[in-house]
């Protein structure tokens, strides 16, 4: 759906129903009856109005992941709760200098986020480039995973799967299993890829084709980078150019070891293993036919904004930890998921920042699994990872903090005041409490 006259207005109804997934009918959740929900296209400076109707049996709400918009009132307010049968009118005003790129929307009601996204509630948002890059076509590829039982229903998640972060047995592209794509030799396509999986990391390859990465999340590199492989944590997006080479290629995801609870569960030492993330083929691309003239060179991209020259007004540390909690029903132990020792409480402000200031945060992970850390509203610039500073400015809204590792980021709290959240984007961990409240004022 495209904006007109500076505005995009739509109704979005979340409901349980019958959808077609991988050639069979399944009972899943969807926005307006489709998986994924409609792709929304806007320009910087425009306004997005969404009337969300909750046709589910549980509370829900809507979050526009990565958009730099106000977190207050009817904006991107994660504290809104829409009860079953009720509606809510969201209004998102994009600033005139909003970065172009790929964003996405999904529910965000604490305690139900993983279930509702796993169930099928997600869609893409594109903010157009001021200067389009020449491409024969553009594809939006939303990658998600799901598990269906013999009757096409989603089985209930187990406490163990929640602690690990659930991964589905089927990996889907735009709700389809292994779709076929076709193109002609030398064509250039723009691929915009969302990792909408609840917990699965994607290590994407498209061997035999030429991939150039324009950027990750809302961040763009100064020049496109030629890559063989792209790693996307849950929530990350890739903005990619593919130049077609004759033949058949498979878009696949390779195994990624994101760690596991290891010895913490009392089940013996299992260092960095035990997560089911495996190899899967996602789509098959056939390139055949008459070769087209080569696409023109990619125009120079504006240099990314860099906060390393701006004064830092505060430094803080956020420690993401797993600990032993109480006992579960079956007598097994339950893990706790905390940030600076605390579980999420919507009525407590964990971090207060001054609107307009620049802060430097050290994101520390003391646990034996990776945590992809996400902050709403304000993007993060990575200034140190693995003990070294990147050469160019890298902007992301989900930053993976590896098991027992740390990452330093800078954040400019520009434009908006109000309350929002940061959390682990393994959404089971978020639902188990790994989320904090931030207030800019
Ligand atoms: Cu995509 Cu708060 O999340
Ligand atoms: Cu978000
Ligand atoms: Cu996590």
Image (tube, rainbow, N blue to C red):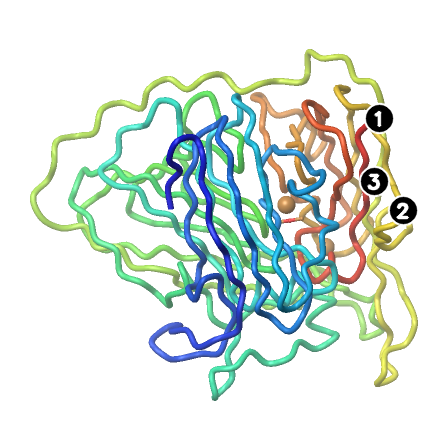
Q: CB atoms at circles 3 and 1 under 8 Å apart? A: no
Q: Residue at x 65, y 68 (%)?
A: 84
Q: Residue at x 17, y 30 (%)?
A: 294
Between circles 3 and 2, the one closer to the viewer is: 2
Q: Secondary structure at mark 2?
A: loop
The numbered dot on residue 7 is none
Vertical order, 372 against 239 (above or below): below
Between circles 2 and 1, the one closer to the viewer is: 2
Q: CB atoms at circles 2 and 1 under 8 Å apart? A: no
Residue situated in front as seen by the camera: 278 or 161: 161
Q: What residue sits right under mark 1 in the picture?
A: 315
Residue situated in front as seen by the camera: 1 or 125: 1
Q: Is residue 338 left or right of residue 226?
A: right
Q: Secondary structure at mark 1?
A: strand
The numbered dot on residue 318 is 3
Q: Is residue 119 left or right of residue 422?
A: left
Vertical order, 195 against 399 (above or below): below
Q: Quadrant of ligand 2?
A: top right
Q: Residue 240, image x and y in percent?
A: 39, 38
Q: Residue at x 74, y 64 (%)?
A: 111
Q: Secondary structure at mark 3?
A: strand
Q: Is residue 431 left or right of residue 201?
A: right
Q: Residue 402, image x and y in percent?
A: 70, 47
Q: Earlier in the sequence, mark 2 or mark 1?
A: 1
Task: Count neighbours of disc 3 (C-alpha within 10 A) and say few if under 14, some if 14 to 19, many if 20 or more.
Answer: some
Q: CA distance from mark 2 to mark 1?
A: 20 Å
Q: Quadrant of residue 369?
A: bottom right
Would you say the beta carbon of the disc 3 residue lies within 8 angstroms of ligand 3?
no
Q: Is residue 439 left or right of residue 192?
A: right
Residue situated in front as seen by the camera: 44 or 295: 44
Q: What residue sits right under mark 2 in the picture?
A: 348
Q: Residue 296, image x and y in percent?
A: 22, 24
């Amino acid at each position: 759906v495209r904006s007109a006259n500076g505005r995009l207005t739509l109704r979005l109804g979340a409901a349980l129903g019958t959808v077609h997934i991988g050639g069979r009918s399944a009972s899943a959740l969807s926005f307006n009856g489709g998986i994924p929900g409609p792709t929304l296209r806007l320009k910087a400076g425009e306004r997005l109005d969404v009337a969300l109707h909750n046709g589910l049996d549980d509370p829900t709400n809507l979050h526009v992941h990565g958009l730099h918009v106000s977190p207050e009132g009817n904006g991107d307010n994660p504290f809104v709760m829409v009860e079953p049968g009720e509606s809510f009118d969201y209004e998102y005003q994009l600033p005139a200098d909003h970065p172009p790129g790929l964003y996405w929307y999904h529910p965000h009601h604490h305690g139900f986020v993983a279930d509702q996204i796993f169930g099928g509630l997600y869609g893409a948002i594109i903010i157009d480039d001021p200067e389009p890059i020449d491409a024969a076509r553009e594809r939006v590829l939303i990658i998600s995973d799901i598990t269906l039982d013999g009757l096409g229903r989603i089985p209930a998640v187990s406490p163990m799967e929640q602690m690990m972060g659930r991964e589905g047995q089927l990996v889907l592209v735009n709700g389809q299993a292994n779709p076929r794509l076709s193109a002609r030799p030398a064509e250039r396509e723009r691929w915009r890829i969302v990792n909408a999986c609840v917990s699965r990391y994607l290590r994407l390859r498209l061997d035999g084709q030429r991939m150039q990465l324009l950027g990750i999340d809302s961040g763009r590199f100064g020049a496109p980078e030629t890559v063989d492989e792209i790693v996307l944590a849950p929530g990350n997006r890739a903005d990619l150019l593919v130049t077609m080479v004759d033949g058949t290629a498979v878009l696949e995801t390779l195994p990624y070891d994101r760690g596991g609870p290891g010895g913490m569960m009392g089940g013996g030492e299992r260092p960095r293993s035990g997560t089911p993330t495996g190899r899967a083929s996602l789509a098959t691309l056939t390139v055949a036919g008459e070769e087209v003239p080569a696409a023109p060179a990619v125009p120079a991209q504006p240099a990314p904004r860099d906060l390393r020259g701006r004064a830092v007004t505060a430094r803080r540390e956020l420690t993401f930890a797993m600990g032993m909690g109480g006992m579960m029903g079956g007598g097994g132990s339950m893990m706790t998921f905390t940030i600076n020792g605390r579980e999420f409480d919507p009525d407590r402000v964990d971090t207060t920042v001054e609107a307009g200031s620049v802060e430097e945060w050290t994101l520390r992970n003391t646990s034996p699994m990776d945590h992809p850390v996400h902050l709403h509203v304000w993007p993060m610039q990575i200034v140190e990872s693995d003990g070294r500073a990147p050469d160019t400015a890298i902007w992301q809204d989900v930053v993976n903090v590896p098991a027992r590792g740390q990452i330093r980021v800078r954040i400019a709290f520009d434009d908006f005041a109000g309350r929002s959240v940061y959390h682990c984007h393994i959404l089971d961990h978020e639902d188990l409490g790994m989320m904090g409240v931030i207030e800019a004022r």
